[in-house]
Structures are given as C-alpha cells and as structure tokens.
Amino acid sequence: MDKRIKVLFVCVHNSARSQMAEAFLNKLAGDKFEAKSAGITPGQLDPIVVEVMKEIGIDISGNKTKGIKEFVDRGDVFDYVITVCDESGCPFFPGKTEQLHWSFPDPSGLTGTDDEKKIKTREVRDQIKARIEDWIKKF
C-alpha cells in the first residue's frame, strides 16, 4: 500500500506555477510525496516555464494541463491541496484535506522581452523550489 503523502497543487490554468511545484515535489521528495497539479480552467503549458525548468534538469515538456474537475469526478483524495496562485483568483478544492495557500507571481502574465520574462520566471521557479524545500523539512 502506498503510504506517500498525496498533494495537489492548484492554480488558475495549470500552465506554470502548479506545474513547477508538482515537478519539484516529485523530484525532491518523491519517496515521501506524490504530487499532482491542476487548474480551475486548464490552459496551455507555458513554453518559458518549460525552458527554465529544463535549465535545471527537470523536463516538463510532456506534461498536459489538467482541470480540478477530473480529480473531483474521479473522487481522488489528497492529504494537502496547495494553491499557488494569487488569493483573489485561487479556486477552492472540496473534500476533507488540509488546504494551504502559497502565493507566487504568475509567469504567464509577465510582460517584456523573452529574456526579461525568462529572468522573472527563473525567480518564480526558485521561489517555488525554496518553499517546497522548506515545507518538506517538516515531514
């Protein structure tokens, strides 16, 4: 029987922040956690996010965006649901689970040149990684 702690990272579109968080938790502590991600209205995977994750050896290029509804419809149960979007746009996930909120800027909404967007996306990526590294120390 799988004793890993099940975590769902939720964002608005499942195109950037939640995808990065899922990848980091599975890479850093996949022996203790099983991470998945979803969005309230799934969008397209952000190509700059794919690129900056690849820079640090994590390939999410084959990931698909998913909606919360598919997890709810299947009756999936999570120990933690962690929203990683701005509070005003974050969805609520039903069920008996501990819900946490970690707000990160949305890389999909960044403006500027591609190089400027990459710099800012790297900052968000590194913030997410640091937050996950800190959180997993509690287990």
Image (cartoon, grey):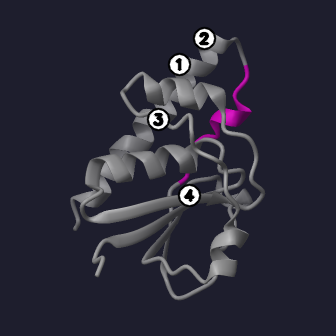
Q: Distance between the residues labelled 3 and 1?
A: 10 Å
Q: Residue 125 carries which label?
A: 3
* Badge count: 4
Residue 107 part of the magenta segment:
yes
Residue at the outermost bottom position: 96
Q: Residues within 10 Å of mark 4 (few under 14, many from 20)?
A: many
Residue identified by numbered label 2: 115
- Circles 3 and 1: CB distance less than 8 Å? no
- Circles 4 and 3: CB distance less than 8 Å? no
The stretch in magenta equals 103-111
Residue kind at label 1, given as amino acid type: Ile
Report the residue at 46% width, 30% height from top.
Answer: 53
- Circles 1 and 4: CB distance less than 8 Å? no
Q: Which image quadrant: the C terminus?
A: bottom left
Residue kind at label 2, given as amino acid type: Asp
- Circles 2 and 1: CB distance less than 8 Å? yes
Quadrant location of residue 49?
top right
Q: Residues within 10 Å of mark 1 (few under 14, many from 20)?
A: few
* Residue 14 on image: x %, y %: 65, 50
Q: Distance between the residues labelled 1 and 4?
A: 24 Å
- Residue 120 seen in the current view: yes
- Residue 93 seen in the current view: no
Q: How far apart are marks 4 and 2 (CA)?
A: 27 Å
Residue identified by numbered label 1: 119
Q: Which image quadrant: the N terminus?
A: bottom left
